Amino acid sequence: MTMIDRRQALAGGAALLAAGATPALAAPADTLNAAAASRGRRFGSAFAFGTAGADRGSFANPAYAALLRRDCSLLVPENEMKWQAIRPAPDRFDFSRFDPMVDWAVANGFALRGHTLLWAYSRWFPAWLNNYDYGARPASEGARVLSSHIDTVTRRYGRKITSYDVVNEAVDPDTGNLRVTSLSTAMGGTEAVLDHAFRTARAAAPHAELVYNDYMSWEDGNEKHRAGVLKLLEGFRRRGVPVDTLGVQSHIGLFAPSPDAGALARRLEPEWRRFLDAVVAMGYRLIVTEFDVRDKGLPAAIAPRDKGVADFARAYLDIMLSYPQLHDVLAWGMSDRYSWLRTFEPRTDAVINRGCPYDDRFAPKPLYGAMVGALANARELRII
Ligand code: 9MR
């Protein structure tokens, strides 16, 4: 930690207290980023746009900014760099929400990841792109629409963004096949789209780490998804496509009653390691890009729920951090208050999911301690 980082961390703590939140853990040395840094890694989080005074997971919310300053050295926009946010029409870009996030991150000394240059799933395309008329020469028009996007974003932010999720979620988890979109139909197949995205990104942002990001996970039921991702990664290597890293989103979950989360983790470990081993054997690096824990299978009572979440997370992160090829670890939000799980996957009993390091009132939970422990005990990083 530099002096400036330390000052910021302390200032962050003061802001947290000023905002009336529960006093959080201890000294900056015990923070998530400090634990990560002790083993040569970085810890980070998703964050959002917001206006001053808005109750959001935003840099403009002092209580949330305090958590970012205390625990993170790396940030990623949760939504504001997606096509739906920045490309309202084929010939128009709108950076009015993302620019202030980048400015704030840079001014406050954070590194930045870009998410995502292409979410290769029509559900998350802007409507205009799903309905786009690619004209008489669809392959070249598809390539042009995609390159113009990647060129515009990467050139605008230059070296301020050091790592991109170039492609997000191209594999259908139910079949393991690549998803079909208007772009893939125009360009003669999904592989052509993905290869073009990575090649364009490498040419436009040669300094940046290029990541394929997906949510194939270690729980039962992800077998086809994992196989599909391995096949895709093999294809990238065969075709010489410039992909550096697999982004392992890591929205891990306890979906059924799991009185012994540690035992469940031990059962899942061998198959999960086979997957990760295959990925690193192909020369890919790893990043945990969107870590959180879904706790639907656990009882509402807080003590056993927090213990189950913490035990499951610790076992998972210990495995991930045993890989010297794994560098950054990012949470998909620091506080349960703003987690996507609240709206996307509400629990049937309507209590708030407790899968982020801080609860909905900004108090650290056992999960926080589990994450610090895993980061502090990580295998030394080896950059490849
Ligand atoms: O957390 C994000 C949520 O606020 C958005 O509404 C949603 C759709 O844009 O995306 C969520 O983030 C997803 C991420 O971009 C890709 N991996 C899965 C994340 C959780 O759904």
Image: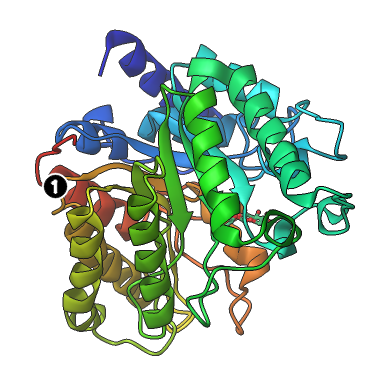
Where is residue 341? Give x, y as percent: 58, 65
- State the image quarter where residue 268 is shown: bottom left
Residue that appears at 58% across and 78% down: 347
User: Going by the image, does 57 lie left or right of 145?
Assistant: left
- For ligand 1, the image quadrant comes to bottom right
- Crowd rating for badge 1 (residues with CA inside 10 Å; few <14, some 14–19, many 20+): many
Residue at the farthest front position:
136
Q: In which quarter of the image is the C terminus?
A: top left
Where is residue 15? Give x, y as percent: 51, 26
User: Going by the image, does 328 lie left or right of 200?
Assistant: left
In terms of depth relative to the viewer, which is nearer, 36 or 213?
Answer: 213
Question: Is residue 49 something that shows in the picture?
Answer: no
Residue that appears at 72% across and 58% down: 124
**How has the structure been colored for display?**
rainbow
User: Going by the image, does 316 lie left or right of 354?
Assistant: left
- State the image quarter where residue 141 is shown: top right
151 up-or-down from 317: above or below: above
In terms of depth relative to the viewer, which is nearer, 328 or 177?
Answer: 177
Q: In which quarter of the image is the N terminus?
A: top left
- The residue tagged 1 is 378
- State the image quarter where residue 350 is shown: bottom right
Question: Is residue 11 something that shows in the picture?
Answer: yes
Residue that appears at 26% across and 79% down: 261
In terms of depth relative to the viewer, which is nearer, 161 or 30?
Answer: 161
The amino acid type, in three-letter code, at marker 1 is Ala
Residue that appears at 44% across and 50% down: 212
